Amino acid sequence: MRIMISADMEGATGVTWTSDVVPGTEQWQRFRRLFTGDVNACVAGVFDGGATDVLVNEAHSAQRNLLLEDLDARARMLTGRHKPLSMMQGVDSGVDGVVFLGYHAGAGEDGVLAHTYLENSITGVWLDGVPASEGRLNAAVAAEHGVPVLLVTGDDRTCVDAADYAPAAKLVAVKECVSRYAAICTPPRRTAEQIAEAANAAMALAGRRDPAPAAHRIEVEFDATHLAQAAAVVPTVEQLGPRRVGFDAATMTEAMKAFKVVTAIAAGAVEGIYG
């Protein structure tokens, strides 16, 4: 059984604010260790549950956050940016299940550090008319390749979201959202136990399914009109309103590639503190 862990950082144990996840800060150095601890707990759990190979795909920001020297020696780690499938790189390599570790709620929703791809600027994303977090988008990519979502960890709002897009998956809330930058946090010794136990149990869900390729539509709403105008220069992307764009794609993989282009162009159009 080959398992992939897509590891984001905003939903890791203890993380509650910007400096916890921005590379180069003292807080980031501290939370790299806690983030790696969450990953190791998951690796241990899936191996106890029967995994024979585990690939950890770094999925946060520059995607160079986990401490390789502290990683469980049984795992392999994919690190660095500019991967064709980004957070889901490796899902097309014959894996039997995927874990969304350290995930968070989507843009426009309540949740600790809630966002979708861009930390701000995006106020909402919809997949086929349904509000979409990174988890929902990535679950659709996984389904296209016949890979089940086994486990999702993050704050309690993340777990509510995941219960809708991956109803069979195990869920672990490592913190309880109070606001975007505050949470009631469970200590790492306890979250490690909870993650490992859930990961072990989640292995009962592992096993490839029939691939489910399908056409999809993504719509994105920004917090300023010029960002929508900038994104609309992309062929196939239509401006639907002053701050909203949308596009159709033949597959979810193609939809996510287009979404990456839209977010990259929008990010490049942000000008200083006025956005």
Image (cartoon, rainbow, N blue to C red):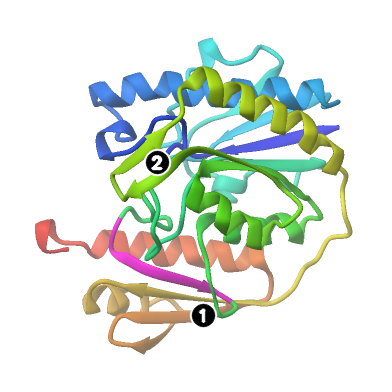
- Label 2 secondary element: loop
Structural distance between the alpha carbons of marks 2 and 1: 25 Å
Q: Is residue 122 magenta?
A: yes
What residue is drawn where x is 34% and y is 64%? Answer: 265
Extreme residue in the bottom direction? 241
Magenta stretch, residue numbers: 120-127
Quarter residue 26 falls in: top left
How far across and how far down the image is residue 188, in percent?
49, 21
Q: Is residue 108 magenta?
A: no
- Label 1 secondary element: strand
How far across and how far down the image is residue 84, in percent?
58, 50
How far across and how far down the image is residue 28, in percent?
32, 26
Quadrant that contains the C terminus = bottom left
Q: Residues within 10 Å of mark 2 (few under 14, many from 20)?
A: some
**Which of disc 1 and disc 2 is earlier in sequence?**
2
Quarter residue 55 falls in: top right
Quarter residue 210 falls in: bottom right
Judged by its main secondary structure, the magenta piece is strand
Residue corresponding to mark 1:
247
Q: Residues within 10 Å of mark 1 (few under 14, many from 20)?
A: many
Which residue is more in the foreground, 150 or 68? Answer: 150
Query: From the viewer's perspective, is residue 90 above or below residue 32?
Result: below
Which residue is more in the foreground, 165 or 157? Answer: 157
Apparent side of residue 144 relative to residue 184 in the rendered image (left or right): right
Which residue is more in the foreground, 104 or 84? Answer: 104
Quadrant that contains the N terminus = top right
How far across and how far down the image is residue 130, in percent?
56, 75
Residue corresponding to mark 2:
61
Apparent side of residue 209 relative to residue 200 in the rendered image (left or right): right
Residue type beneath disc 2:
Ser
Query: From the viewer's perspective, is residue 81 above or below residue 26?
Result: below
What residue is drawn where x is 41% and y is 67%? Answer: 262
